Image (tube, rainbow, N blue to C red):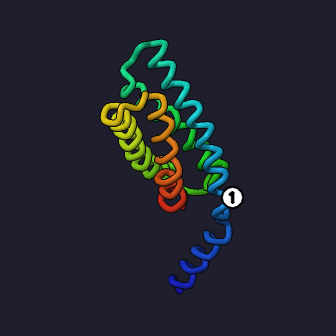
């Protein structure tokens, strides 16, 4: 009997899940908004406050992550009914990994390949956002 109820819950979760393409488009739109804020903070810290670009990248990523979590939970994946604490912890793990990938990626492209840090930021943000963040959000954070 417990297996049957569990199966029904799983079926219901699959039925109410935002379709893949819809969640992908919404997630990318959410990411674009979060990235715009991330990039704005990054530029403000580097160009106005003269903070080292690696630290500015981390601060920008943190701000962007907060916006991304709210948009993902409430709109892109529509998982407001999920446990906030569990989602937040999973999101923190995902964001921490994303922060490391973004920060190291920007550093590597800038220091080893000689790409200007602003271009490094754009390249790495797109790669990490599409190929890491989306799949982690859909299948780990907001499953």
Q: Is residue 130 above or below residue 13?
A: above
Q: Quadrant of residue 82?
A: bottom right
Determine the residue positioned at 58% across, 37% down: 34
Q: Give the total number of marks visible in the rendering.
A: 1
Q: Is residue 17 visible?
A: yes
In this view, 29 is above or below 140 = above
In the image, residue 107 sits, relative to residue 49, either above or below, namely below
Residue 30 horizontal/vertical position (percent): 62, 43
The answer to whether residue 79 is above or below residue 51 is below
Residue 16: x and y in percent read 67, 66
Q: Which residue is mark 1?
A: 22
> Residue 15, image x and y in percent?
67, 71
In the image, 101 versus 118, the foreground residue is 118
> How many other residues sit within 10 Å of disc 1, few (<14), some (14-19) or many (≥20)?
few
Q: Residue at x 44, y 35 (%)?
A: 120
- Residue 62, visible in the rendered structure: no
* Residue at (36% x, 41% y) in the render: 100
Along the line of sight, the residue nearer the viewer: 91 or 27: 27
Residue 97 image position (x, y, % from top left): 38, 46
Q: Residue furthest bottom?
A: 1
Q: Quadrant of residue 37?
A: top right
Q: Residue furthest front?
A: 114
Element class at badge 1:
helix
Outermost residue to the left = 112
Residue 31 in the figure: left or right of residue 118: right
In this picture, residue 18 sits left or right of residue 50? right
Q: Residue at x 39, y 17 (%)?
A: 51
């Amino acid at each position: 009997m417990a297996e049957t109820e569990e199966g029904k819950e799983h079926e219901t979760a699959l039925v109410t899940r935002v379709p893949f393409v819809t969640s992908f488009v919404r997630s990318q739109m959410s990411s674009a908004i979060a990235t715009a804020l991330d990039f704005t903070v990054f530029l403000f810290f580097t160009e106005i406050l003269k903070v080292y670009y690696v630290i500015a990248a981390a601060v920008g990523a943190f701000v962007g992550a907060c916006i991304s979590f709210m948009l993902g939970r409430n709109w892109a994946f529509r998982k407001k009914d999920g446990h906030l604490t569990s989602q937040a912890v999973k999101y923190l793990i995902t964001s921490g990994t994303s922060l490391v990938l973004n920060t190291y990626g920007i550093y590597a492209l800038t220091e080893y390949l000689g790409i200007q840090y602003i271009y490094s930021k754009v390249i790495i943000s797109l790669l990490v956002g599409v190929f890491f963040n989306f799949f982690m959000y859909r299948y780990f954070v907001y499953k």
